[in-house]
Amino acid sequence: MTAKLTIAFSDEVLDALRSSKSITIRLEGSRGRAGGGGSDEPRAGSLPARLIEWGKTRKKTFGTRDVSRRFKLSRAHASMLLSRLANGPYPIHRERRGVYSYAR
């Protein structure tokens, strides 16, 4: 299936494009964020959201192995997911290599 995108510009935008030869367009999704960043919480029900909820209930630190077993992921996938969450604006923090915690 091929995706089709139709863009309709107003006369003002077309005039600005003709006169300055360039315009700036910012694309936003339905959640109001561009470029995939900027939200404090991932989409509900997604794997990152479920991992954050799971981490919230744990009293002690957890690692790649724990996530791998709990969510039935490969070690590489669990490691990538934890790393992405720890480096983003999420409440998962890296304690040391392979060990993460939920920020309280």
Image (spheres, rainbow, N blue to C red):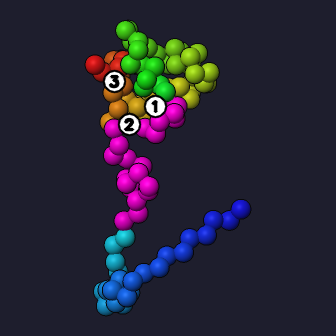
Residue 80 vs residue 102: left or right? right
Task: Write the start and end of the magenta stretch as one range.
Answer: 26-49
Look at the numbered disc 1 and give the secondary structure of its residue.
helix
Q: Main secondary structure of the magenta part?
A: loop
- Please say if 100 is above or below 31: above
Residue 60 vs residue 48: left or right? left
Task: Tell me where residue 6 appears, x and y as whole percent.
Answer: 54, 75
Residue corresponding to mark 2: 41
Residue name at image x 37 percent, y 47 percent: 37
Task: Tell me where residue 61 appears, x and y as whole percent.
Answer: 39, 12
Residue name at image x 35 percent, y 43 percent: 39
Name the image quarter holding residue 58.
top left
Task: Tell me where residue 34 appears, x and y as whole percent.
Answer: 38, 55
Find out whether the residues at labels 1 and 2 contact each other: C-beta distance under 8 Å.
yes
* Residue 93 numbered tag: 3
Q: Nearer the viewer, residue 27 or 84?
A: 27
**Residue 17 drawn in magenta:** no
Name the image quarter holding residue 83.
top left
Look at the numbered disc 2 and give the secondary structure of its residue.
loop
How far apart, in angstroms, are the residues tagged by discs 1 and 3? 15 Å
Residue corresponding to mark 1: 49
